[in-house]
Image (spheres, rainbow, N blue to C red):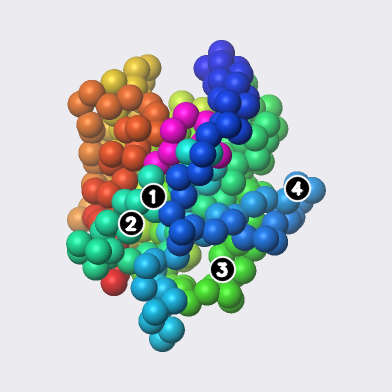
């Protein structure tokens, strides 16, 4: 039922978003070329944030953060329920702390969002497409970005972040592509959709330098807090001494307002030694 309610809400909010003015910063662009998703017969829009110094420092290369649900990252005009303010936060961090990263935002597929961001077939999603979506990110999007922009392409400078189902699929990338993504931010993850991830996380060790930031709001309801704490325990047990951070915001709810507030703290922790 949660899936059905969420789907109707997203459709309704998407219709409302069309009348909102753009809030995207000038250093955010929508790539003209949509990228095809192999195996799914779909194309996807990519939204790109480049650091303030990108055009002024032609020899400089930058860490990269891949994020899902790009409609909600930079612009109120395309967001469903408010935006993360990723561009504003990073512009401020660049000015005040010298932290500069490229952000690659991958649009969600609207009615395809649920299956694309789910790893295993389940009751709410009888045909999961998460494996194909992750291959698309790893084998299409990342090579495309690395070939056209001045990235630091190694895993030590490459991260992924997402919330809700985006958090779920981000954890999937952590387990399936550890050679590509060394810095992972998992916000309000919908672990209840694919409980098999607990077993995977408990069995598969991560490279010792992988940084994992787990976040959940105490006001999200359901089993979200308990689920995230449980996953944190699995990761710590399997990867003793690894940089794994668990953050519980006591009153935060399951929405973009909470994720926007947490983003600066998370991105600083993930990329503090990757400049």
Would you call the spot at circle 4 few (<14 residues within 10 Å), some (14-19), or many (20 or more)?
few
Work out which residue is located at the far right of the displayed protein and give it: 41
Sooner in the amino-acid sequence: mark 3 or mark 2: 2
Tell me the quarter of the image containing the N terminus.
Answer: top right
Which segment is the magenta one? 78-84
Q: Mark 3 or mark 2, which is nearer to you?
A: 2
Closest to the observer: 182 or 110?
A: 110
Closest to the observer: 112 or 174?
A: 112
The residue that label 1 is drawn on is: 86
Q: Are marks 1 and 2 in contact (CB under 8 Å)?
A: yes
The dot on residue 90 is 2
Q: State the image coordinates of residue 173 (x, y, percent, origin top left).
A: 49, 52
> Is residue 167 visible from the viewing direction of this image?
no
Work out which residue is located at the far bottom of the displayed protein and give it: 59
The residue that label 4 is drawn on is: 42
Q: Mark 1 or mark 3, which is nearer to you?
A: 1
Sooner in the amino-acid sequence: mark 4 or mark 1: 4
Q: State the image coordinates of residue 80 (x, y, percent, origin top left).
A: 52, 31
Decide if residue 275 is on the left or right side of residue 250: right
């Amino acid at each position: 039922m949660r899936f059905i309610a969420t789907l109707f809400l997203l459709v309704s909010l998407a219709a409302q978003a069309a009348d909102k003015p753009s809030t995207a910063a000038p250093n955010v662009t929508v790539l003209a070329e949509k990228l095809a998703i192999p195996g799914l017969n779909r194309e996807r829009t990519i939204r790109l944030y480049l650091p303030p110094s990108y055009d002024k420092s032609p020899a400089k290369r930058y860490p990269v953060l891949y994020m899902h649900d790009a409609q909600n990252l930079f612009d109120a005009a395309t967001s469903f329920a408010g935006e993360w303010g990723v561009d504003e936060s990073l512009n401020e961090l660049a000015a005040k702390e010298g932290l500069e990263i490229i952000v690659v935002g991958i649009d969600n597929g609207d009615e395809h969002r649920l299956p694309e961001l789910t790893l295993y077939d389940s009751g709410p999603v009888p045909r999961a497409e998460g494996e194909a979506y992750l291959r698309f990110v790893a084998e299409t999007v990342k090579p495309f970005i690395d070939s056209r922009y001045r990235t630091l392409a190694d895993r030590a400078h490459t991260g992924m972040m997402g919330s809700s189902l985006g958090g779920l699929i981000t954890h999937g990338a952590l387990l399936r592509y550890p050679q590509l993504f060394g810095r992972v931010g998992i916000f309000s993850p919908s672990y209840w959709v694919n409980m098999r991830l607990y077993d995977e996380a408990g069995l598969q060790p991560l490279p010792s330098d992988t940084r994992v930031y787990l976040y959940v709001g105490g006001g999200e309801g359901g089993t979200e807090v308990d689920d995230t704490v449980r996953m944190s325990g699995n990761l710590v047990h399997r990867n003793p001494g690894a940089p794994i951070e668990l953050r519980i915001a006591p009153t935060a709810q399951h929405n973009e307002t909470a994720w926007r507030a947490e983003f600066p703290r998370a991105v600083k922790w993930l990329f503090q030694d990757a400049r």
